Image (cartoon, grey):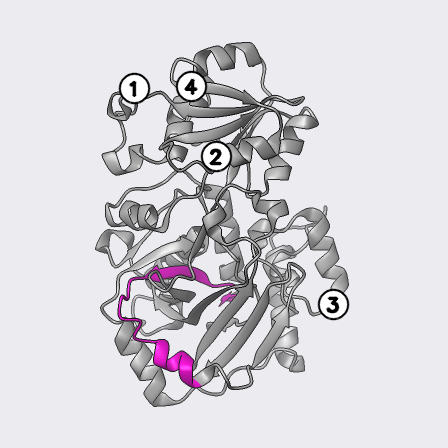
């Protein structure tokens, strides 16, 4: 059975997936930790044991031929998660995203062939690297995008879409996932050749990609005689055309943990130096105000009780003068303005401080963090546009971590890449 990506699974959800089936992929991607764990017996070594056991029992079956997998996701945008921030996202309408799953040759970012857009954190990379070392496998894809104005792979979809899919499931968020296998040599070659000169942008899975790259480097160092065709030179990836209309980027909001010295009145006073501050009556009014695309730089803030504020950067301020350490294309992003002016300058939280901020795509979650007293303030952002995402990546810039939420997420376990 499948599960969401490891990094969005709560402790409660982890337990639920464990109970669903003894063969749920949760045992591979996010195993339980126990007090007696050591270097020999831990969640990574147990994952490897489960994987070998399932292969031996025929629970998992190797594909007999080289294949590429087409994946279509049909979904709607849930208002309980995304609120009313952007009506253009098509809330209530069924949407489709189509892409394909294949192996991607790992390359250093310095070559410019594969480009990141977000900063990563050390602990998640270490966690995924340990899992690769133990299991020699990928359980979830790195999500990549590419540019193709001609939509050259549409003909592949046209031939396959009416066939019975290999997998057809609708999961608990009412997202339908349909998977088809392509194993005829001509079509596989057509896709491979069509992608040969494409630059790739990592949308999601930066930690997985960097961990796979580190593992490749380890293996090359310890096996200098091995050719570049060895399986560890590749990572399982999902490829989506940036121009196909199926790429939806949604915002990730922030809640700042309560800290000594925080004063709401002082925060409002300092913010008012840079922003026009408007108090609104409730969350819905705040979210509706954020939809106004005429206001170039606007975000929301919640400080507790029923104190919601719309923050709009004052016309008199020059972004170039306020944020000097970033290039122009990055300075225009609301998330950069929020971090540079408010979180770092006003609140005094250093860049890279991973313990002080809670990130969530769920508006209700960051609100509840402030309501329960564990956090002192929450900030709400509008989504980064696809054009902004493309521009940032092409310029070689890096956004603050947890800036983009590409929806829907990819399920772990639909396809597994075992190295040997």
Nearest to the eye among marks 2 and 1: give it: 2
Nearest to the eye among marks 3 and 1: give it: 1
Badge 2 or badge 3: first in the primary sequence: 3
Q: Is residue 296 left or right of residue 149?
A: right
Badge 2 or badge 1: first in the primary sequence: 2
Of residues 331 and 53, the one nearer the viewer is 331
Q: Which mark is residue 317?
A: 1
Q: Which residue is mark 4?
A: 276
Query: Which residue: 54% across, 59% down?
Result: 93
- Distance of label 3 from label 1 (alpha carbons): 57 Å
Q: In the rendered view, would you say 181 is above or below 146?
A: below
| Circles 2 and 3 in contact, beta carbons < 8 Å | no
Badge 3 or badge 4: first in the primary sequence: 3
Q: Which portion, as a residue range, is magenta? A: 136-159
Q: Which residue is mark 2?
A: 290
Q: In the rendered view, would you say 159 is above or below 303?
A: below
Of residues 269 and 409, the one nearer the viewer is 269
Query: Which residue: 66% across, 69% down?
Result: 1
Residue 375 falls inside the magenta stretch? no
Q: Which residue is mark 3?
A: 21
Badge 3 or badge 1: first in the primary sequence: 3
Q: Element under label 3?
A: loop
Q: Element under label 4?
A: strand
Residue 120: horizontal and vertical position, in percent?
42, 44
């Amino acid at each position: 059975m499948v599960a969401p990506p490891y990094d969005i699974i709560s402790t409660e959800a982890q337990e639920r997936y464990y109970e669903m089936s003894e063969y749920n992929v949760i045992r591979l991607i996010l195993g339980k930790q126990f007090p007696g764990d050591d270097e020999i017996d831990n969640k990574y070594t147990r994952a490897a044991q489960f994987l070998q056991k399932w292969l031996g029992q025929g629970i998992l079956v190797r594909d007999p031929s080289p294949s590429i997998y087409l994946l279509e996701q049909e979904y709607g945008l849930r208002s309980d998660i995304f609120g009313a921030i952007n009506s253009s996202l098509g809330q209530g309408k069924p949407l489709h995203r189509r892409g394909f799953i294949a192996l991607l040759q790992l390359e250093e970012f310095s070559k410019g062939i594969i480009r990141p857009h977000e900063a990563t954190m050390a602990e998640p990379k270490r966690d995924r690297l340990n899992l690769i070392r133990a299991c020699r496998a990928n359980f979830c894809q790195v999500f990549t995008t590419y540019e193709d104005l001609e939509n050259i792979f549409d003909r592949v979809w046209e031939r396959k879409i009416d066939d019975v899919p290999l997998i057809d499931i609708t999961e608990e968020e009412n997202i339908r996932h349909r998977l088809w296998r392509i194993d005829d040599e001509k079509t596989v070659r057509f896709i491979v050749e069509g992608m040969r000169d494409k630059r790739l942008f990592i949308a999601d899975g930066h930690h997985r990609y960097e961990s796979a790259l580190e593992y490749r480097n380890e293996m090359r160092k310890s096996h200098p005689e091995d050719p570049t065709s060895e399986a560890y030179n590749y990572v399982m990836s999902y490829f989506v055309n940036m121009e196909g209309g199926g790429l939806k980027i949604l915002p990730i909001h922030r809640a700042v943990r309560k800290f000594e010295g925080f004063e709401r009145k002082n925060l409002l006073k300092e913010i008012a130096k840079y922003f026009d501050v408007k108090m609104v009556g409730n969350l819905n009014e705040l979210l509706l105000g954020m939809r106004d695309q005429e206001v170039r730089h606007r975000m929301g803030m919640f400080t507790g009780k029923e104190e919601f504020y719309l923050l709009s950067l004052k016309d008199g301020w020059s972004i170039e003068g306020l944020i000097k350490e970033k290039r122009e294309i990055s300075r225009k992003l609301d998330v950069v303005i929020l971090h540079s002016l408010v979180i770092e300058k006003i609140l005094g939280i250093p860049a890279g401080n991973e313990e002080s901020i809670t990130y969530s795509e769920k508006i209700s979650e960051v609100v509840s963090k402030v309501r329960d007293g564990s956090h002192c303030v929450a900030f709400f952002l509008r989504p980064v546009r696809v054009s902004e995402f493309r521009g940032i990546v092409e310029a070689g810039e890096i956004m603050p971590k947890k800036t983009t939420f590409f929806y829907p997420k990819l399920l772990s376990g639909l396809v597994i890449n075992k190295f040997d």
